[in-house]
Image (cartoon, rainbow, N blue to C red):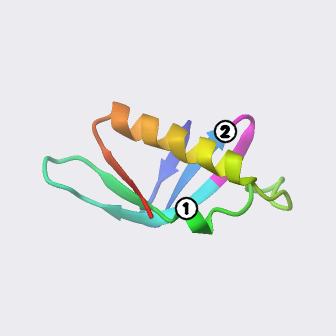
Amino acid sequence: MILEVTRGHILFKHKNNIVSIPGEMFFPPGNKMGFAVFKGEIKNWCAPNDAILLTSFEIDEVVAAVKKEFDAGGNSLEIE
């Protein structure tokens, strides 16, 4: 579940953990929101689990779940 979207990150809750997903917001035509995710910069969960690194599988799961929420709202998510 998306908890917050700012110019530089998305805060996302996934299976009782929260992850901060770095990226950059943009505004495509049509009054919708866009966000470019910097997938290679997703490393660990947020506190109190910040010492736990995400696996590549977990990163893929998180990104897919965020994309699904963006798509449902008619917004754009690009993965870089």
Left or right: residue 32 compared with residue 63: left
Q: Is residue 23 above or below residue 52?
A: below
Q: Which residues are magenta?
A: 14-19
**x and y, in percent, of residue 36 in the image:** 40, 61
Q: Which mark is residue 39?
A: 1
> Residue furthest toward the front?
57
Q: Earlier in the sequence, mark 2 or mark 1?
A: 2
> Residue furthest toward the left?
30
Q: Nearer the viewer, residue 4 or 26?
A: 26
Left or right: residue 56 compared with residue 71: right
Q: Is residue 12 above or below residue 45?
A: above
Q: Amino acid at mark 1?
A: Lys
Q: Is residue 50 magenta?
A: no
Q: Amino acid at mark 2?
A: His
Answer few, some or many: residues within 10 Å of disc 1's Cα (few below 14, many 20 plus, some between 14 and 19): some
Which secondary structure class fits the magenta region best? Answer: strand
Q: Residue at x 31, y 54 (%)?
A: 34
Pair 2/1: label in front: 1
Residue 7 sits in which quadrant?
bottom left
Residue 26 sits in which quadrant?
bottom left
